[in-house]
Image (cartoon, coloured by chain):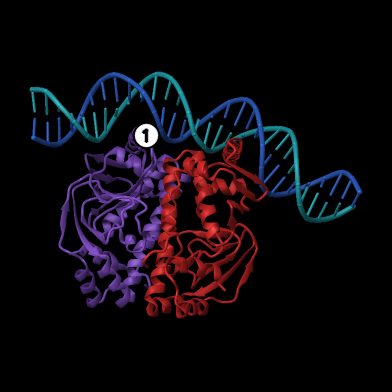
Chain colours: A purple, B red, C cyan, D blue
Amino acid sequence: MPNALIEKLSRRGPLGPDEVDALRDATEPPICVPAGQDLVRPHESPSHSTVLLSGFCARYTSLSDGRRQFTEINIMGDFVDLHSLLMQPMDHGVVTLTPCRVAHASHGALRRITQQHPHLTRLLWQDTLIDAAIHRQWLVGVGRRSGLGRFAHLLCELDVRLAVVGQSENHRFQLPLTQSELGDAMGLSAVHVNRLLADLRREGLLQWQGQRVRILDWERLVDLAEFEPGYLQLAQAPA
Amino acid sequence: MPNALIEKLSRRGPLGPDEVDALRDATEPPICVPAGQDLVRPHESPSHSTVLLSGFCARYTSLSDGRRQFTEINIMGDFVDLHSLLMQPMDHGVVTLTPCRVAHASHGALRRITQQHPHLTRLLWQDTLIDAAIHRQWLVGVGRRSGLGRFAHLLCELDVRLAVVGQSENHRFQLPLTQSELGDAMGLSAVHVNRLLADLRREGLLQWQGQRVRILDWERLVDLAEFEPGYLQLAQAPA
DNA sequence: CGCTTAATTGACCATAATCAACCAGGGTGG
DNA sequence: CCACCCTGGTTGATTATGGTCAATTAAGCG
């Protein structure tokens, strides 16, 4: 049932019916996972990868003093650990931030796809390349952007990605992350996230009540973030 | 002639002679490029990818105020923009930090590899996954590591990667980067890089004269960095 | 209603940036 | 051969962004 995944991939290079079947065959029935659980633990060598069907999770690595850094926020339709097919053991963990529905895809089945479906393989490869591009943007953010710009960029990224899978409309979406988790995503303390959020609100850029985000001035937010969505490969590409 | 590349890939999954041939056929004769030139410019859509045969270059993205963030240092044997095969246009640039020898591989030839050589394709895919893992480590560094730990981690990473292609022995290697370039890699100012380097020297962790780096206390440097080399996939993996 | 988690705010501190000199080495032209 | 210059390295003084600690309020939830 990885419909959001199929939707996302086929935007980048139309999927043939055999390819859709191959993907469906590779994925097992959905499983529900509560919030705060590791979908994959660091240093594990899983024999399957996981498609996120609903909910939010995060790739993270922890340091010895307990500090934690997220390296990506994963949303519906993301293959959260496709790379575990070729990278063993895992160099990081994946934790659910909300209750999630997921579907496993055994590495055996995925390997078969790489042998029989070169075009689909390129699309999956491309999906992992986009993960890398997201990493690079985050890296530019923590390395060189101001706290405010970094926050703005994260919101732009999430808005666009959520829109692709129908979870954001008119720049309104649900974002069930705590400020502490946002801090782990941006390399900031929870306290500072709170102050930056206050700044964004004061500037009239967005509303954020509970888990409901509404971007009020998309143009200005994009400006502040220097957001260029090209890296998310939204246009049809020759895969 | 991408021998360092072949060497690196075959460590991860032995290459058959037909695969080696396919790689050699795909790469064109070497070209020399002076320092400070873009191998790929941001937003370009190249029709070939580039293997670095010798020298150092860096992936970067620049912000409007001129600040620059490197997202990876590339060394001999790296496919600096393999991802341009599937990501168009480029989301970042690649600049030579020293004079470099490079070989182009046309996207046509690479695409043929993806159609005819599933195993080699997986190895190339894996190489891009390792780039992503390097990005993640850098992200953890700028997000959560101290300046000193970040510096130490970069040196550990480079030492290990250089050793794989025979450019580091007994923790001695050439690193022809300026302190300003190191700053771009670590998200720090050149001045601060200088002070951190002084700290590392004072601690007796390394010598660094000119471009010659010698790590004096590998164990302690690894400790300081919390360096876990697994993400570089040095062990034979079932690709 | 009480308990727990998350958000908010303030005071103070630390890491690293910025600004500004100054020094060292290597290459160039006279 | 040497003066000059340019780049890169080194150091000091000052500033700023963001972290830490601590207390308070708000919001869910059984």
| Residue A11 relative to residue B54: left or right | left
- Considering the image in quadrants, where does the C terminus of chain A appear? bottom left
- Considering the image in quadrants, where does the N terminus of chain A appear? bottom left
* Count of residue discs: 1
Residue plotted at (28% across, 69% down)? A110
Residue plotted at (52% across, 77% down)? B24
User: Against A191, is A152 above or below?
Assistant: below
Crowd tier of the residue under label 1, counting other residues whose Cα lies within 10 Å: few below 14, some 14–19, many 20 or above = some
Q: Which residue is mark 1?
A: A192
Q: Is residue A102 visible?
A: yes
Q: Position of residue A34 (x, y in %)?
A: 17, 47
Chain under numbered label 1: A
| Residue A98 relative to residue C20: left or right | left
Q: Amino acid at mark 1?
A: His
Q: Position of residue B224 (x, y in %)?
A: 48, 40
Q: Position of residue A208 (x, y in %)?
A: 26, 40
User: Against A208, is A18 above or below?
Assistant: below
| Residue A189 relative to residue A173: left or right | right
Residue plotted at (61% across, 48% down)? B214
Residue plotted at (35% across, 71% down)? A122
Q: Position of residue B171 (x, y in %)?
A: 58, 51
- Give the structural element (helix, strand or loop) at label 1: helix
User: Against A191, is B156 above or below?
Assistant: below
Q: Is residue A142 visible?
A: no
